[in-house]
Each structure stands twice: as C-alpha cells, then as structure tokens.
Amino acid sequence: MVHLFDATRGRAVALLSPGRHTVRLRVHLACAGAAVGWDEARALVVADVLLRALEMEGVQVFPGVAVPDLPPPEIQRLDRLVAGYGVRVSGAGDDPRADVHVLSHSCDASAGSGVVLRVGRTAAPASTPPLPQEPTNHDAAARRRALLATHYREPLTVSETGLRDAATALAGWRTSVAAWSRSPSSPVPSAIRDRARSLLGADLDTQGLLGLLDEVAHDPGLLDGTRFEVFVWLDQVLGLELSRDLGHG
C-alpha cells in the first residue's frame, strides 16, 4: 500500500483503496519565467518514480503533464529533459479529477480533489543546468540520482560537487552490476523486497532506497547473484540504468 503526504490535508493518506488497480496521475509544472529548470526536472522525476512504483505493484497509471504556454525552445528543452532523464510521464493533461497531482515548486495550479504532492524547491547555480548543452560525465542518470538522494518534499541545492559524487557512485554501481551479472542468479530475499516496498510506500523514500542499495552492495552475507537481482529489480523504480554496462569489459 502506497502512502503519500497530501499537502492539502497535511497528513499521509493511502493512495489506493482496496481492489483498485488504476490511477490518474498529473504533473503540474510552474516553469517560472517561461523556462524549464531544476524544479521542473525534479517534479518529473518524482512523478516518474511514483508511476514506476505503482506499476511494480500491478497498478495501471494514466499520466499527463500540465505546463503553461512555453516558447518553442523551452518545449524542445522539456522534451529533451523527459527523454534524457528516462521519465515515462508525458503527454498533455490537466484533468482536475486526477487521483494524484505532483506540483513543482511554486506551482499554484488547482489540483481538484486528488492527493497533492508538493515538491520542494531545487536551487542550482546558473552554470549547472538540469540538462547541459555539452555532453559531460554527469549524464542525466547521475543528475537523477542526485535528485533522488534527498526526499522530494525537502529543499535541495544542486552543486557540481554533488553531481560529480553522484556520477562517481553511479559508475561504481554500474561496474559492480556488470561484474555480479557473471555469477549464478539468485532470488531477491523477501526481507529486502519487503523493506524496499515499505520505503516506497512511506511517501516515496528514495533516499532510503539508495541507502538500501548501498547496504546490499557491501553486505558480505549476500551472493553476487543476489546483489545483481536486487539492483536490477530496484532499478525498475529508480530508473538509473544500473545495468547499462552489462557486456562491457
């Protein structure tokens, strides 16, 4: 059962009633100054994780994104950001009857009667855009990891140092996953599966999920085949392309 903090009610609520298997999800982007920035990137990533978590539980999600009128260059930037970050929430939509609304910082859109998730402010220097013009070693997945390392309701400041650290950690995990893939496969332990679902169900604790992956990576009591299966399974929600290096080296 997924519980989310409803900003309208000021408390955690269950997203789904028993027996329900569909959810209408809307992301509302403020795009201050008619520009797509870090606040929009973070809201999209949060909504994408929610979509993936619900799909993992067998729920069918109907997503949509509501944006103000944007100039063509910003529309293209938004499309690039969605593709680069691996976000599966797309398509126009501002249906107030949606079951859950994800609002970027400073967005004042009417959210109807659904559950409202307000994403915290995300700040960054002008030299650190959410999607750089030139390729760097900070791929979009590393930026995504940096965003997920802080709970979505908390304010976040993105820095070049933080992005480098995220890129380094991500590269290490990918190398490990590629190495573990050569060991015999082993099922995800029920204790790890239950803990992961508990973290996701507790208002999308992605910071806790990243910590769980780190524990799995360093637990001497786990087989490499088990580590591999855990990382691949949780990557279905986190969307970090952890198996990207399989078959390399």
Image: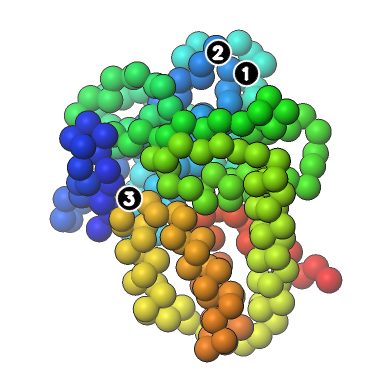
Disc 3: which residue: 203
Measuring from the top left, give residue 32's x and y in whole percent: 51, 16
Q: Is residue 66 visible?
A: no
Q: Left or right? Give the position of 109 relative to 35.
A: left
Q: CA distance from mark 2 to mark 1?
A: 8 Å
Which is more foreground, mark 2 or mark 1? 2
Q: Left or right? Give the position of 238 relative to 169.
A: left
- Quadrant of the frame with the N terminus: bottom left
Disc 1: which residue: 74
In the foreground, 98 or 150: 150
Residue appearing at x 20%, y 42% in the figure? 11
In the rendered structure, which amino acid carries the disc numbered 2?
Ala
Measuring from the top left, give residue 172's x and y in whole percent: 70, 65
Residue appearing at x 55%, y 13% in the figure? 34
Disc 2: which residue: 34
The disc, 3 or 2, on the residue closer to the chain's N-terminal end is: 2
Q: Of helix, strand and loop, which one carries label 2?
A: helix
Q: Residues within 10 Å of mark 1 (few under 14, many from 20)?
A: some
Measuring from the top left, give residue 189's x and y in whole percent: 42, 81
Q: Is residue 78 above or below residue 217?
A: above
Q: Of helix, strand and loop, which one carries label 3?
A: loop
Residue appearing at x 44%, y 60% in the figure? 208
Whether the residues at callouts 2 and 1 have beta carbons within 8 Å, the answer is: yes
**Residue 196 shows which numbered tag?**
none
